[in-house]
Amino acid sequence: MQEREISKAVIKRLPRYYRYLGELLEHKVERISSNELSDRMQVTASQIRQDLNNFGGFGQQGYGYNVKYLYNEIGKILGLDKTYNMIIIGAGHLGEALANYVKFEKRGFRIIGIFDTNPELEGKTIRGIQIMMDDRLPEFLSSHDIDIATLTLPKAGAEAIAPVLVKGGVKAIWNFAHTDLDLPPDVVVENVHLSESLMQLSYNINRKNRK
Amino acid sequence: MQEREISKAVIKRLPRYYRYLGELLEHKVERISSNELSDRMQVTASQIRQDLNNFGGFGQQGYGYNVKYLYNEIGKILGLDKTYNMIIIGAGHLGEALANYVKFEKRGFRIIGIFDTNPELEGKTIRGIQIMMDDRLPEFLSSHDIDIATLTLPKAGAEAIAPVLVKGGVKAIWNFAHTDLDLPPDVVVENVHLSESLMQLSYNINRKNRK
DNA sequence: TAGATTGTTAATCGATTAACAATC
DNA sequence: TAGATTGTTAATCGATTAACAATC
C-alpha cells in the first residue's frame, strides 16, 4: 500500500498548526473552521484544508474542525504520542541549554545521557543527567536503545562521532554542528544551523533597507 | 530600478554555498565549476548557476568560479561585510549559550548587552557582556543603535517586549520564543523554533520506519 | 430544509531542471 | 582554434490557490 509521499513543505507546517491548535485548546475553543484558522495563522484556508487532507478527513462539512481532536491527530502524525530516548553529544553551552530545556521532556523526548570529551566534566550532571566521556559511547549505545542523538559539538567532532552513532543503532540525529553529515539513508537528520539562520537575518536587514 | 524579488528558497541556500566555499578556500582550492560544486553539495549544477545569477555573473565560461571571489561576493550579498550591534533578551541557558558563541562576533555580530527580568542576575556578566534589567531597555535603545535583538525568553515575555524593541528602533529580531511575533513590515524577523524542528525529526523517525 | 464548510478537483503560479547558445 | 563551462531561455515539475460539488 504505497502512500503518496508527503512534501517537506507540508511537514514543516504541521508543528505550527499544532502550536496554534494547542493555544486554541488552552483558550477552550471547541471548533474552528479553516477560514478562522487562516485568519489567525496567515496561511490560506485552502492550504490548511489541502495540508490536513494529506493525512485524512479530520473535519466535518458545515461544522469545521474539532480543535481537541485535530490537535491530538496532528500530535499523532508528528509522533508525539510516543516517547524517545535522547542523548546529547557535547556538553558545551548549547548542549547544556538543551539539556536544561524541560519542555522537551514533557513532549516525550527523554534525555538519558550527555557525552563530552573534556575529562573535567566526567561524573558531573546537568539536571540530574550524567555527563560521560565519549569513549564510553559504544558501550552505552549497546546497552540503551537510543532514538535521537543531539550533536552540539564542533564540526570535526560531529563528523567523527556520526559513524559511532550509526553503528550503535541511533535512528535520528538532531544536528547543530556546522556541517552536513554523511549518513546512511535510513538515519534521519534534522539540521539546525544557527549561524546560517543569522546570515539569512542579516541578508534581510540589508534588503529591507534598500527598498 | 525595480530589482526582481529573490525567492526565500534562494536566500536559504546562500549561507550553505558560503559555508562550502569557505571550506574550499581553507583547502586552497582556487576555482570550482558548478558541476564540481553540485557533486559536493548535492544540489543540481543548474540550480547553482540559476541561484548565483540572481545576483550577477560571478563565473567565467570555460573556467568556472573563482572560489575566493565568489566567497567574498556571497558574503557581501549576505551582509557579512558589515557589523551589527546585537542584544540578547533573556539570560537563561539558551541566551547564555548564544552570548558565549564567539563565532558570531567574528562574523561581525557584536553582542553589546544582555537583558533579563531576574534581579539576581543584575550586574553579572557573560563573557564580559553586562546583564541589565529589562526596564532599562528603552533607555539603552535610545542611546545605542541596535540592529538585532535576540529573543531567548518565554512566549509571553517575548510578545510583551517586542513593541519596546520596535519603538527603540531595532531593525531585526532573531526570535527563539515559541510564538509568531506581530511586527510592523519593516522589522525583519527570523524564527528559530527548536521544538518545531524536533517535531519534524520525530515525524521523520516514524515515517522512515513505516516504509 | 437551508446554510455552512469541508474534501477534492482543476487552474495557476513559482521553482527546479534541462538544454543550448554565448563566450572565455 | 577547440574545449569547457557559464549565463539564460525553455520545459518540466511541484506546490499553492481557486472553485465547487458533496455533505453535515
Image (tube, coloured by chain):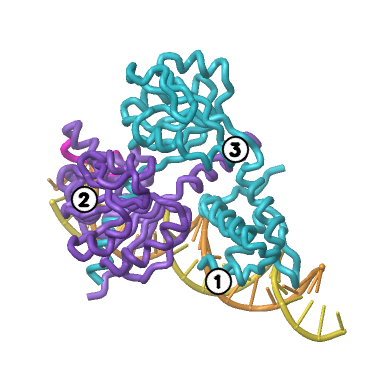
Chain colours: A cyan, B purple, C yellow, D orange
Q: Residue furthest front?
A: B119
What's under tag 1, amino acid-wise?
Asp
Density class for disc 2 (Cα within 10 Å; few <14, some 14-19, many ≥20) is some
Range drawn in magenta: B29-36
Q: Earlier in the sequence, mark 1 or mark 3?
A: 1
Instruction: Please check the rendered image and state whether residue B139 is part of the magenta-colored stretch, yes or no.
Output: no
A72 and B18: which one is in front?
A72
What's under tag 3, amino acid-wise?
Gly
Q: Please state the chain letter of the residue tagged with numbered disc 2 in the rendered image.
A: B
SS at circle 2: strand
D18 and D9: which one is in front?
D18
B1 and A39: which one is in front?
A39
The residue shown at (66%, 64%) is A29
Rendered position, A65 above or below A78: below
Q: Which residue is mark 3?
A: A108
The residue shown at (27%, 54%) is B52
Quadrant in the picture for residue A38: bottom right
Quadrant including the N terminus of chain B: bottom left
Instruction: Please check the rendered image and state whether residue B33 is part of the magenta-colored stretch, yes or no.
Output: yes
Residue B74 locus on image (x, y percent): 22, 51
Q: CA distance from mark 2 to mark 3?
A: 37 Å
Quadrant in the picture for residue A62: bottom right
Depth check, mark 2 against mark 1: the one in front is 2
Rendered position, C2 above or below B5: below
Depth check, mark 2 against mark 3: the one in front is 2
Left or right for A157, reference A80: left
Q: Which residue is mark 2?
A: B112
Quadrant in the picture for residue B100: top left
